[in-house]
Image (cartoon, rainbow, N blue to C red):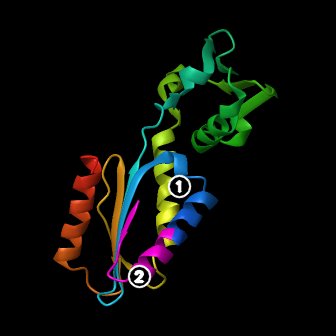
Amino acid sequence: MLVECYDERGAEVYEIIIKQIFQDLVLGASVDDLKAYVNPDDPVFVLAIKMRKTSNVIRFEDVANLTYDKANDKTMILVDNENYLPNILKILWMQFSRDEIYQPNRYQLEIKGDYTDLSSVVVDDPHSNLQRRIYDAVFRILPEGFKNIKDLSSENIVAVVATDELIKDEWLEKCHEFIDELNNGM
């Protein structure tokens, strides 16, 4: 972790703030590196965070068996991994009303009609979940009042420039430098 600031004490304080927020959100093990630039004279905050690799997306077919009962015209979903049941229900409730989903027991769901095509629907995306949690941390870290925010994030790097003024090109360049350094492991 590197916090750049002409004021050593200010850099130390921001490092403590960042570490505390990461600890509160249990993000320490999910981040490879972080670079920040703070300049109180030129009110700007540049932050770039490299995320660790996550596991692959989880689809219905990975955590549940979907079968179509042609005689009764219903799709039966047998949940293999109970940890994903809330995600499965949330997805189904977005597509169907709660009344259309019959749940005779904890692991079994039934829907009228043939919906076996749900097997390829994403139930959980660890990368998106981690990215969302990191954005939460970023918005806690940013100084209050810095409402002009430019998001320069890429696949595995969350990067923002924030200020209470117009965003300057030099700050965007600084952010791009951080992104390049994090991508190249510097």
Residue at 60% over, 53% down = 26
Q: In this view, does 19 lie above or below 55?
A: below
Q: The residue under label 1 is which amino acid type?
A: Arg
In front here: 78 or 81? 81
Q: Is residue 143 left or right of residue 181?
A: right
Q: Residue 138 in magenta?
A: no
Q: Is residue 73 left or right of residue 128?
A: right
Q: In this view, does 21 lie above or below 155?
A: below
Q: Judging from the image, what secondary structure is the residue with disc 1 in?
A: helix
Q: Residue 14 in magenta?
A: yes
Q: Where is residue 9 in the image (x, y as percent from the top left)?
A: 45, 81
- For label 2, the crowd category at 10 Å Cα-Cα, with few meaning under 14, some 14 to 19 and many 20 or more, is some
Q: Name the residue under label 2.
A: 146
Residue at 61% over, 14% down = 68
Return the mark for residue 42: none
| Magenta-colored span | 1-15
Could you tell me how many numbered marks the image carries? 2
Mark 1 to mark 2: distance in Å?
20 Å
Q: In which quarter of the image is residue 166?
A: bottom left
Q: Position of residue 155 (x, y in %)?
A: 33, 46
Q: Judging from the image, what secondary structure is the residue with disc 2 in?
A: loop
Earlier residue among tags 1 and 2: 1
Task: Point out the residue furthest to the right here.
Answer: 105
Q: Is residue 90 left or right of residue 122?
A: right
Q: Is residue 83 left or right of residue 158?
A: right
Return the mark for residue 133: 1
Q: In this view, does 109 lie above or below 168?
A: above
- For label 1, the crowd category at 10 Å Cα-Cα, with few meaning under 14, some 14 to 19 and many 20 or more, is some
